[in-house]
Image (tube, helix red, strand yellow):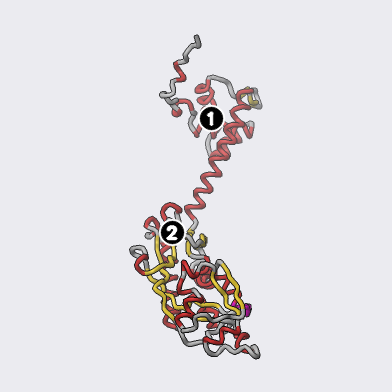
Amino acid sequence: MRRQNANRNPDVKPDMTRALPSLDLLRGFEAAARQLSFTKAATELFLTQSAVSRQVQALEEQLGVALFERHHREIRLTDAGHELYRASAEALRLLTDTAARIRDKSAARTVTVTCTIGFASLWLVPRLMDFRAQHPEVDIRFNANNKILDLDRERIEVAVRYCPAKLAPAGAVKLFGEEVFPVCSPELLERPGKPLVVPADLRHHVLLHHAHADKGWPTGSWSVWLETMGLHGLQSAGSLEFNQYDQIVHAALDGQGVALGIGPLVQRHIGQGRLVAPFEQRFASPRGYYLVTARFAVERPEVRDFTAWVAATAQREAGDQ
């Protein structure tokens, strides 16, 4: 019969406070072991030589073993001392590094933002230099994602939600609505034999499509736009399809075709003359962009600074149009 060991009862947990020597004793021992001198260890720790000696003696009494061989002008580690030194040096290094990382994180002013890939690329990132000039001490981290992320679970401070008004989260601040209209590079207007004066002229040009427009973004669908204009069945000169909206805009900037522009996301390029809107017709969408702050972050100064800047920038640009 196998003999039961009473000390291995799984319901009994070891008393770690009795098994582990105090940190002060370990720090005194580690310094003395590294320096092989109680005097040098005392100088490093801003203690007296006798205080370090008493710490080592107390540690030896707790462990029941000698850690140093004491000679007239030197001390040497015993085998047990070598073993404890290796373990204590590594443990103290790990504690020091971890405490430094935690301290650095708490001192840093960081705001993590989630938004659609298109909004990040076309609206937020190009304007971010202005915020950084005003608040150079605040670091911004992006989690650009077309999926809606849970702010509390992901520990994300700020979100810009792209959604219909009825689906905007409680307390969200509307930045701007969505207005859709064709845009293209100015060079397309100058191509001989390919006019672009009225919507029917789109038959001469390549149309830039969003892969999921008909299902997830009907106002951004060329088929919907053409049908609204009474041009159902219009055959364009070709088509290019992309799965991200910023890719569509970059293709339009390169003169590769005509895109359906979202007002706030293409307005900067229009203002710079890199894109033009060849027709006057514009259609409002029920969707918009809404600024949301996570509940756990509403009182943080850097978060308030960032959200105030985003809202003010959107309001100012809306007034300039």
Report the front residue among 260 and 91.
260
Image coords of residue 79 (percent x, y): 64, 23
- The residue furthest top is 1
Image coords of residue 59 (percent x, y): 52, 26
Image coords of residue 212 (percent x, y): 51, 67
- Quarter-wise, where is residue 235 in the image? bottom right
Q: Residue at x 51, y 21 (%)?
A: 61
Q: Amino acid at mark 1?
A: Ser
> In the image, is residue 40 above or below residue 184?
above
> In the image, is residue 74 above or below residue 183?
above
Q: Which residue is mark 2?
A: 157
Q: Residue at x 64, y 90 (%)?
A: 193
Q: Residue at x 48, y 61 (%)?
A: 114
Left of 57 or right of it: where is 158?
left
The C terminus sits in image quarter: bottom left
Q: Residue at x 46, y 85 (%)?
A: 281
Label the magenta part by its dominant secondary structure: loop
Q: CA distance from mark 2 to mark 1?
A: 52 Å
Left of 71 or right of it: where is 22?
left
2 or 1: tag closer to the N-terminus: 1
Span highlighted in magenta in the image = 252-256
Answer few, some or many: residues within 10 Å of disc 2's Cα (few below 14, many 20 plus, some between 14 and 19). Answer: many
Answer few, some or many: residues within 10 Å of disc 1's Cα (few below 14, many 20 plus, some between 14 and 19). Answer: few
The mark lying in front, picked from 2 and 1, is: 2
Residue 139 visible in the current orientation:
no
The disc at residue 50 is 1
The disc at residue 42 is none
Image coords of residue 300 (percent x, y): 40, 59
